Image (tube, helix red, strand yellow):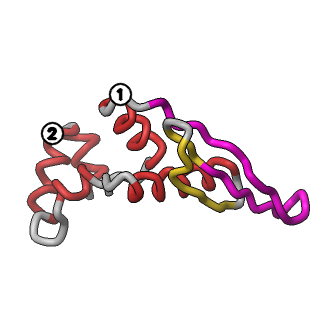
Amino acid sequence: IIAAIYITKGYPSAFLFVSKVFEDQVDFQKLVNQVDNFKSALLEFTQAEKMSLPDYKVISESGPGHDKVFEIMVYVDNKELGVGHGRSKKIAEQAAAKVALKTLGVR
């Protein structure tokens, strides 16, 4: 239904429809403000606070080549702020940034 409204009436009509139908079930403001890119949030925070940019370093890799687990530490102002683990460097960096934000009292 939403796709049909979007195609025939455009984005504003589709948005209005979704908003009215789901306004009681979804907190749209909370959804908009939700942070799921912790690396970006950490970068924005450190820039706003005039801190050094986050520096991510691999501190260990374990497991076979096809199933590695990475452990990454994030440093800000040469201080260890968080460590993260993941099956890719990207996932481990996101996890480390999330811990760093908590350490800094941001999230």
User: Dot 2, how many residues are within 10 Å of its Cα: few (below 14), some (14-19), or many (20+)?
Assistant: few
**Which quarter of the figure is the N terminus placed in?**
bottom left
What is the spatial separation of the Cα atoms under label 1 and label 2, in whole angstroms? 39 Å
Q: Would residue 17 be found to the left or right of residue 2 on screen? A: left
Residue 11, how many percent across, how many down? 22, 39
Residue 26 vs 105, above or below: the answer is: below
Residue 47, how many percent across, how many down? 37, 29
The residue that appears at 16% across and 71% down in the rendered structure is 25
- Return the residue nearer the eye: 30 or 56: 56
**Which quarter of the figure is the C terminus placed in?**
bottom left
- The numbered mark at residue 9 is none
SS category of the residue bearing label 1: loop
The magenta stretch spans residue 71? yes
Residue type (three-letter) at the residue carrying disc 2 = Pro
The residue that appears at 57% across and 46% down in the rendered structure is 74
SS category of the residue bearing label 2: helix
Sequence-first disc among 1 and 2: 2
Q: Would residue 19 be found to the left or right of residue 59 on screen? A: left
The residue that label 1 is drawn on is 50
The residue that appears at 42% across and 42% down in the rendered structure is 42
Q: Given this view, does label 1 or label 2 mark the residue nearer the observer?
A: 1
- Magenta range: 52-73
Residue 27, how many percent across, how many down? 16, 63
The residue that appears at 27% across and 50% down in the rendered structure is 4
- The numbered mark at residue 12 is 2
Q: Would residue 33 be found to the left or right of residue 83 on screen? A: left
